[in-house]
Amino acid sequence: MIFVNGKAMQCMPLQSILTHFKTSLPVNAIIINGKLVEDIYDNIIIQDGDEIKIIYPIIGG
């Protein structure tokens, strides 16, 4: 079990997680266990217990 933006879900590759949470907004940053991830997502291995935060821009004025 992993946690993505506070939601528990089954462990899967990072690219699959990004596809699952796809929105019309671009992803600004991804944080895994408190560490900022660079934009080479194919090399990231997600493990049980990982906490992932997907950061999107806030639009408004």
Image: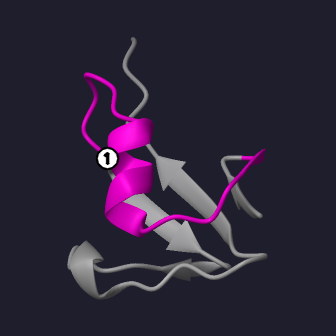
Residue in the picture at 33% in, 26% down? 23
Q: What residue sits right under mark 1 in the picture?
A: 27
Relative placement, left or right, of 4 versus 14 is right
If the image is split into quadrants, where does the N terminus sit?
bottom right
The boundaries of the magenta stretch are 6-27
* Looking at the image, residue 48 lies above or below residue 43: above
Residue 19 highlighted magenta (yes or no): yes
Relative placement, left or right, of 15 versus 54 is left
Callout 1: helix, strand or loop? loop
Quarter-of-image position of residue 39: bottom left
Color style of the picture = one colour
For this rendering, which residue is in front, 44 or 5?
Answer: 44
Residue 29: x and y, percent? 39, 60
Residue in the picture at 43% in, 28% down? 58
The number of callouts visible is 1
If the image is split into quadrants, where does the C terminus sit?
top left
Residue in the picture at 66% in, 78% down? 34
Quarter-of-image position of residue 14: bottom left
Residue in the picture at 61% in, 63% down? 52
Residue 46: x and y, percent? 54, 79
Residue 20 highlighted magenta (yes or no): yes
* Looking at the image, residue 43 lies above or below residue 5: below
* Looking at the image, residue 56 lies above or below residue 43: above
Residue type at mark 1 is Val
Residue 50: x and y, percent? 70, 75
Q: Residues within 10 Å of mark 1 (few under 14, many from 20)?
A: some
